[in-house]
Image (spheres, rainbow, N blue to C red):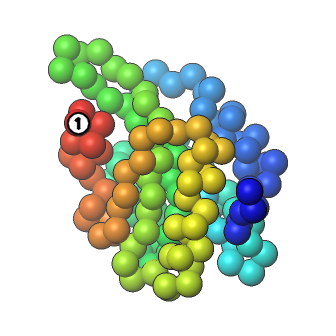
Amino acid sequence: MSQTVDIPQSIKDSLRKFRFARRNAGSAAIVIKINKVKLVMEEVEQFDDISIEELAEELPENAPRYVVLSYELTHKDGRKSFPLVLINWAPTSSEIGLLTLHASALINFQSTADITKVIEIRDGPEGLTKEAIDAKLSS
């Protein structure tokens, strides 16, 4: 199967390290973008113990990103878990060509990151809230 965008080994290694990191408080995220010229994925930044609102402010309002989020979820019975979630950050104000490239590589990235739960965010920082993620994860 051919891919439009290459996922270098360094990204795979970062994802693996991120997935197996021990967390006992707070949410963490790794942000990945597509280099349109080289057609390759690049790590933008990693965040430890970041709130969803802070994360939303860090993401560009006019460019798509893949965000792998280790989310601190508090269950109704008080237990905490840290599910991995893929946030498909695709603001509608992004350049159409980049959005198309981003969409075409999503399934491959999701498979590489080995994450089943995907949350689509198209309306920028207003759409990425703790309430929105809690609602998606509890459904």
Left or right, 53 with respect to 4, comes to left
Label 1 Cα crowd, 10 Å radius (few <14 / some 14-19 / many 20+) = few
Nearer to me, 105 or 31: 105
Quadrant of the frame with the C terminus:
top left
Residue 36 visible in the displayed image: yes
Residue depicted at x 60% and y 32%: 19
Three-letter amino acid code at the position of disc 1: Ser
Q: Residue at x 27, y 52 (%)?
A: 129
Q: Where is residue 87 in the image (x, y as percent from the top left)?
A: 44, 52
Q: In which quarter of the image is residue 44?
A: bottom right
Q: Mark 1 points at which residue?
A: 139
Please give left or right for residue 10 compared with residue 52 in the image: right
Q: In this view, does 34 lie to the left or right of 96?
A: right
Residue furthest to the left in view is 76
Q: Residue at position x 30%, y 70% from top?
A: 123
Residue 130 seen in this snapshot: no
Seen in the picture, residue 88 relative to 134 is either above or below; the reply is below
Query: Quick one: which residue is furthest to the front in this view?
Result: 1
Q: In which quarter of the image is residue 57?
A: bottom left
Residue 62 at x, y percent in the picture: 45, 79
Q: In which quarter of the image is the N terminus?
A: bottom right
Rendered location of residue 116, percent (x, y)? 47, 39
